[in-house]
Image: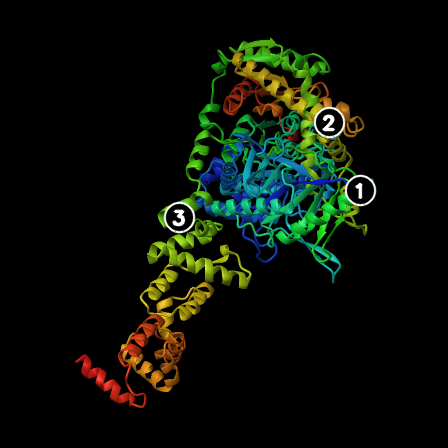
Amino acid sequence: MARQYETVIGLEVHIELSTETKIFCGCSAKFGGAPNTHTCPVCTGMPGSLPVLNEKVVEYALRLGLAANCKINQYCRFDRKNYFYPDNPQNYQISQLYLPICYDGYLDIPAAGGTKRIRIHEMHMEEDAGKLLHDEWEDCSLVDYNRSGVPLVEIVSEPDMRTAEEVIAYLEKLRMVCRYLEISDCKLQEGSMRVDVNLSVREAGSSELGVRTEMKNLNSFKAIAHAIEGERERQTELLEEGRKVVQETRRWDDNKETSFAMRSKEDAKDYRYFPDPDLPPVLISRDMIRELRGRQPEFKEERARRYQEEYKLPAYDAGLLTQSKRLADIFEDTAKLSGHPKKTANWLMGEGLRILKEKGMEPEELTFTPRHLADLIQAAERGEISQKNARTVFEQIVESDIEPLAYMKEQGLMTVSDSDAVHTAIEEVLAENQKAVEEYRSGKEKVLGFLVGQVMRKMKGKADPGKVNELLDEALRKQPHMFLMKGVQEESNRRKTDDA
Amino acid sequence: MEDLLRMPARELGRKIREGELKAPDVAGCYLERIRKAEPHIHAFISVDEGKAAARAKEVEEGIREGRYRGPLAGVPVAVKDNICTKGIRTTCGSRMLENFVPSYDAEVVSRMERQGMILLGKTNMDEFAMGSTTETSVFETTVNPWNKRHVPGGSSGGSCAAVASGEVPLALGSDTGGSIRQPAAYCGVCGLKPTYGTVSRYGLIAYASSLDQIGPVGRTVDDCAVLYEAIAGTDEKDSTSTGTGGGRCSEDVFLTEPGCLKGMRIGIPREYLSDGIDEEVKNAITDAVRLMEANGADAEYFSLEMAEYAIPAYYIIACAEASSNLERFDGVKYGYRSRADAELHEMYKKSRQEGFGEEVKRRILLGSFVLSSGYYDAYYLKALKAKALMKEAFDRAFEKYDCIVAPASPTTAPEVGTSLSDPLKMYLSDIYTVSVNLCGLPAVSLPCAVDSRGLPVGMQFIGARFQDRKVLRTAAVYEQLRGTFPAAWEKEGM
């Protein structure tokens, strides 16, 4: 009988905090920049330089810890992790080992039949390293210390996940929480969210953990899912063959879609951690915790609930819009400005998400002004623009944040409200399509749509289709016996007399 | 000229300020003295005469224009070569940093600069401040101005020898386990190791971060006090900076009458006068105590608990921190890189092997060992516990005494070439100084006698944390009772 296996996964996630300045000096923490321009004696490890803690980092880490239901070490400390590598200018990284800022928390993730709780072992603050650039041509390596000293929080989970889906759900949840807190943009591609996967396999039902491996260099959710699947298979095969899994660090190769054991630098790593004597302990008062708790944002669940009540959105809409804080913010601002919450939701969930998908963008990348979308919705509600043209304008709003009313005028996208022009177009269409008119009158009401389309074409789309529909229907009813050969001008004159 | 070289720093400053002396003349006089004495003393690693002269001219104008009003404007100073000076190479006495030119000034250097002091040069030291003789420097061997066959002590041997030989009125040193106080004692000058945190460490190339402290060296207690005022104070670039605990060492504090020792409670640790101490040093200390008693002080010999753990705790903590602090010297970013064509880790090894001297390597190895997994608890944590207990022992002592008086070293300056062969013996000679660093206390060292070989004997006044001014005041009173101490260069007739 084939043995059943269970996969056990724990994650170490590094999040780059979006503080203005670095963790231990006043240099900009912004991504990019010409090499070694965001640097000073401190973040390049110059002899004699000293670190000074950026208090924002403590605040951000605490807010994440509170959001993830962690306990707080009110007396926490920084430790030095000693290892030699050129991207690490002091050859030690300032991190936290003995007393990390947060511990014993959890995040609930959506799972089959409700939610699943993923426990968080600890969160600690540390500094990022620089980047090595390998120049193949010159056969040398250069160091860029712009990233050196950018603040990181490392979130260590318990081995509570069993599948790639759970891992992705946990990461999405963590990312969403960070984005709601506005402490990190969590971009895997840019490295502002980095995930190391610890995975082991054991016989189903066993309570002991198997030997685990750690996988690095996972730059997308797709890579994470593939790497987990591949590693699960590799370890299961080893166990099936009666061989042993070796505890090692493996590097995922995205092109080859497989992982390789990384060359181990030393046999056993000894980081010789000890408390950093340059940094006094960090004392976190109850008042500070209380104050930060009071400033926590409204997270997804609360917000979705409120949208249902306040804006009468269906649960589905509220859930979808609050997946992303940015989307939720745009929704709420636009709904308030336009006075049409459901229409706003429809625009964002329909056209909005479609455009994002097409462009491969995330909702966080939406930058347009809610006022602009609100103006468009109101114009559409007033019948000043057809649905089709409104879609074009919306795309422009998303793409370049145009001012919709000005744009509509400029591009001639306004609905023509002059009913004379519509009447003229209707009469022309009726005259040109006698066969269809006859069909309609003989009861084939379906042709009405065709006639509406013809009128809209004559109007170059600038008429309100609802209005056209209404007037066309009226025209067809009003002149049941009129002979089709009758001149357009004559008819028009008659109408004018009638009106008078 | 000799008058000028003998003049206390405060008086020198006042005369320059009042126009009686010109800053360029004063600098010129000291630079000439350096030219004359350096071939024998070798106290300096770098002297930039041109820069110093230009700076003196600029400061002189600044004083006349009212830009510099401080007591030390125009006064020359030397700085130990582990304190970063922008544009001036800062070597730590090591091959590793032989050509290292910092891109920034240490906070203390900026402070002295703002007050119009004139930097004459950078002084020799034990490599990375590790040593008690200044012999571990890869540059020249500094000698004791009192007797050139003897060492000046260390690690701030260059600064103390420069002051003792009249090459500068003032100098900065650094003290991690006695590195200001012991050479000050050997050279017959005065040195202050301030309370940990009162002087910014920003720009001091770290040996042991939790123990390092920059401090002044001068010919008298008041020289040290006036320089201490110039460099002390809170610095937001140093997270361990505490400020000085308020007040200033105002001038009148040092114009005390001998009678001021009345009611002063002085404690002398019995442990410091028992094993291993040179009989002459012991007698000099007890004589000094009797002199103070005769002038109103309440002196008492007491037992200082935990004293025997000071040396092991100090060497464990200092080496542990050093092993990490010195990791950045790897041949990648600055400093020495081995010429051997090797891959990265081999390059690291070769550069460090060739760039560091024996004593530095010994301490890195010791420090790496006590931090390594399995030994951390047994050594490093134990040492931290011993340190905490020592602090408590001193706290208890300071409930009873205003000041603790102790020798600065068990002996006077040994002869050149006799210390390095037995490192353990050298470590043990730090017995009276290291506890002060472990406990973050302020202590002044000043000469109290001359031994039969004609070498100065040093004595320490140790105070409770932030009692730097009380310690200075007490030492100043003793200094008055003792009377003028001869300057080495007068004695030698150099």
Determine the secondary structure under disc 1: helix
In the picture, the quarter occupied by the C terminus of chain A is bottom left
User: Depth-wise, is mark 2 or mark 3 nearer the camera?
Assistant: 3
Determine the secondary structure under disc 3: helix
Amino acid type indicated by mark 3:
Tyr
Determine the secondary structure under disc 2: loop
- Report the front residue among B96 and A199: A199
The chain that hosts pointer 3 is A
* Above or below: residue A459 compared with residue A358: below
User: Depth-wise, is mark 3 or mark 1 nearer the camera?
Assistant: 1
Position of residue B193 measured from the top left corner of the image (x, y, whole percent): 59, 27
Q: Let me know if marks 2 and 3 both belong to one chain.
A: no
The chain that hosts pointer 1 is A
Rate crowding at label 2 as few (under 14), some (14 to 19) or many (20 or more) other CA atoms within 10 Å.
Answer: some
Residue A307 got which mark?
3
Q: Let me know if marks 3 and 1 both belong to one chain.
A: yes
* Above or below: residue A420 compared with residue B15: below
Rate crowding at label 3 as few (under 14), some (14 to 19) or many (20 or more) other CA atoms within 10 Å.
Answer: many
- For the residues bearing labels 2 and 3, Cβ distance under 8 angstroms: no
The answer to whether one can see residue A52 in this image is: no
> Is A201 left, or right, of B462 in this rendering?
right
Position of residue B317 measured from the top left corner of the image (x, y, whole percent): 67, 27
